[in-house]
Image (cartoon, rainbow, N blue to C red):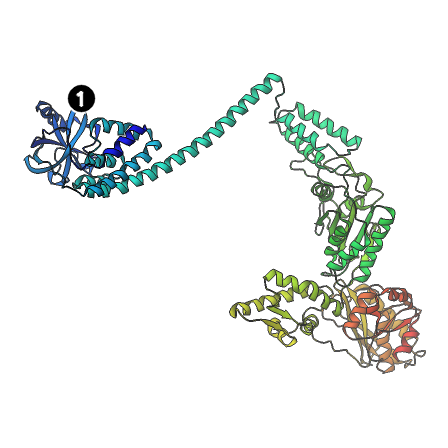
Amino acid sequence: MNDDIHQELEQNASSTGLVLPDQDLPDKLYIVPIHNRPFFPAQVLPIIVNEEPWAETLELVSKTPHQRLALFFMDSPAQDAASFDPDSLPEHGTMVRVHHASKEGGRLQFVAQGMARVRIKGWLRRKPPYLVEVEYPQSDEDPRDEVKAYGMALINAIKELLPLNPLYSEELKNYLNRFSPNAPSPLTDFAAALTTAPGIELQEVLDTVPVLKRMEKVLPLLRKEVEVAKLQKELTGEVNRKIGERQREFFLKEQLKIIQQELGITKDDRSADADEFRSRLEGKVVPPAAQKRIDDELTKLSVLETGSPEYAVTRNYLDWATSMPWGLYSEDKLDLEHARKVLNAHHAGLDDIKSRIIEFLAVGAFRGEISGSIVLLVGPPGVGKTSIGKSIAESLGRPFYRFSVGGMRDEAEIKGHRRTYIGALPGKLVQALKEVEVMNPVIMLDEVDKLGNSHQGDPASALLETLDPEQNVGFLDHYLDLRLDLSKVLFVCTANSLYSIPGPLLDRMEIIRLSGYITEEKLAIAKRHLWPRQLQRAGVPKNRLAINDSALRNLIEGYAREAGVRQLDKQLGKVVRKAVVKLLDEPESKIKIGPKDIESYLGMAYWHPEQLLTGVGVVTGLAWNSMGGATLPIEATRIHTLNRGFKLTGKLGDVMKESAEIAFSYVNSHLKEFKGDPKFFDQAFVHMHVPEGATPKDGPSAGISMASALLSLARNQAPKKGVAMTGELTLTGLVLPIGGLREKVIAARRLKLYELIIPELNRGDFEELPDYLKEGLTMHFAKRFSDVVKVLF
């Protein structure tokens, strides 16, 4: 729409005079109902009606000199018939002049030119063709200034509509050709006709005769139309933009294809795959044998059809073979000070273990590399074996990969499946190397003592080649069928017990024992690691919930007396959860947990201070089990003197039964030497019992304890109080060495037993114990059983 029309509209919109296009206004008119929307005096539009029943009406109109009829809006199309109720018509309609009437396909079409509003005065004929007597309502004189203001507002709104849709521009030109722009009434009607408001709302405009009131109704409709048109334009623009981008991309791709074909550089899926695999090998040092094999497979890939199953198998193989970090190694941080900081930050206690790891790293630093090592961390559950493996990796600056071999029964898990099988995969070690992307990570094999075996092979035997530094230089995975150098990998294995690990596998490992914590160490771990972690998990600020040292000590001694700290962690979690409930009930409160509060949080203690059994025939032994160390009271009593006999109870294994038999025979044959009644066992029926619930017990370390109990019975003298012992006995009275000394010393300290008898051959083991374990202990080293007797009696 050009600027001239805008200016003309603005200059002439203020006039209130109503100028009709034709002053010839007939008082009788035929009427035709329309349905979509009302027809306004300012409109010129084609109208289509059914031939039946309106053909006669139009024929009669065409014979009148003025050729005019009235159009009335009907909201319900169902009444479009000769039988519609004349009283249902609205109050106002529009008188139109009929142009170019024509028939086609049972429909009548004519162009209607809106002339003026009409109101029905009376009905002259209530059947088609309907004929009515009409009047032409005129608007009263409205305040000129207000009409002018509204007229300007309408023109501005129309101006805003023009650039949004070119159809509005055409309608405005059409309107200006027929009407004088200084007439506000046709301008208002024209503005209403421009909108897409519902028919009922537009009929209200048609029914409003006063110009000012009509303008008040039309302006909101027009403003709404402007907003809708703007939104529609934005949406259309966005859709066109997206379509344009896609079309552009499509055209460019098609052009690129044609250019590539013309230049002969087009790529299909096969060549794209091959290029990707070749690019993966850039910067890697691939051994010649592996390179030849990969090249052969790439050649094979280039001749196979992409849809064939063999193509998928070859592609999968190349995917794995080229993902291996051939010749890529991470640089070790051989800094002992850094290693000490990492170990101290992550672990409280375990000083001997830390120094052992530092020694191990020091040798690597001195040599310039750490390779060909298999460390086996053995200890009870919950002492931190897995986390020590992570700390080793962190102190070396190597990637860490952990997988559990507990319960693994298929050797293919270690060495991979052969490619001939559907769904074949490489073994865990190849998967580990692909993930860590270097050839010298720290790989942890967790729970190595729980390997299974089945008809699918023996995984423990498959591990031999993996872990042996002499063999794993050329480790062969069944899937890849390529030699991999695992000699630079640092393997860290964990186990609870050595007994179930096959000898040849154990022989290849460097054993580091972790033997549980004493109360002081557990207290430090709880304060430094476990309690802060539990508060963090629960999202509780440190100043809102606190626990003091004596409460922690109570918790450790009454609820978490096992060797590790996992149970302690669980109990602390339970305390925090119960405290959080209280904090939510009382949002402003702060909780401090003392020793007396522990029972209210955790219930009755699981462990009670152990009562040391004393008296004739009662001795305290020391034992080792997979959960750590334990004290083992041994009781012997004479049942009767009717006949000679010896009875054993206490869920004992074969080794302990043999120990008991040896102890009985030895004491019996040396009674006179040890000041016992030489004839005591000739008539006595003796019963020996090893309590400690129904826990299975076995292991060569209870010989001197059993012999001491029997000797106490024969001498009828209670052994010295507060003494614990461990050691194996031979038939000639020699005391043999035992294992698990650290765990046994910890168990004795837990019971406040500070006088111990151990074999002389274990003196070196005792000297290696940390000072805090040796502090305050009175040690007796026994070469023969007579040395034990001197201490006890």
Quadrant of the rendering where the N terminus is positioned:
top left
In this view, which residue lies farthest toward the top?
A: 262
350 relative to 108, above or below: below
91 relative to 1, above or below: below
Of the pair 286 and 130, the residue shown nearer to us: 130
In this view, which residue lies farthest toward the left?
A: 124
Query: In the drawing, does residue 469 fall left or right of residue 171?
Result: right
Quadrant of the rendering where the C terminus is positioned:
bottom right
Corner quadrant of residue 531? bottom right
For residue 188, say whether it is visible.
yes
Q: What element carries label 1?
A: strand
Image coordinates for residue 423, horizontal then vertical, percent:
65, 37
**Residue pictured at 90% horizontal, 82% vertical:** 677
Image coordinates for residue 256, horizontal then vertical, percent:
57, 22
Of the pair 606 and 570, the residue shown nearer to us: 570
Image coordinates for residue 61, horizontal then vertical, percent:
10, 26
- The local crowd at label 1, few if under 14, some if 14 to 19, many if 20 or more residues have their Cα within 10 Å, is few
Q: Name the residue under label 1.
A: 100
**Residue pictured at 18% horizontal, 21% vertical:** 102
Query: In the drawing, does residue 597 fall left or right of residue 36?
Result: right
Query: In the drawing, does residue 3 fall left or right of residue 357?
Result: left
**Identity, as a three-letter code, of the amino acid under mark 1:** His
Image coordinates for residue 730, horizontal then vertical, percent:
90, 67
Of the pair 651 and 447, the residue shown nearer to us: 447
129 relative to 474, above or below: above
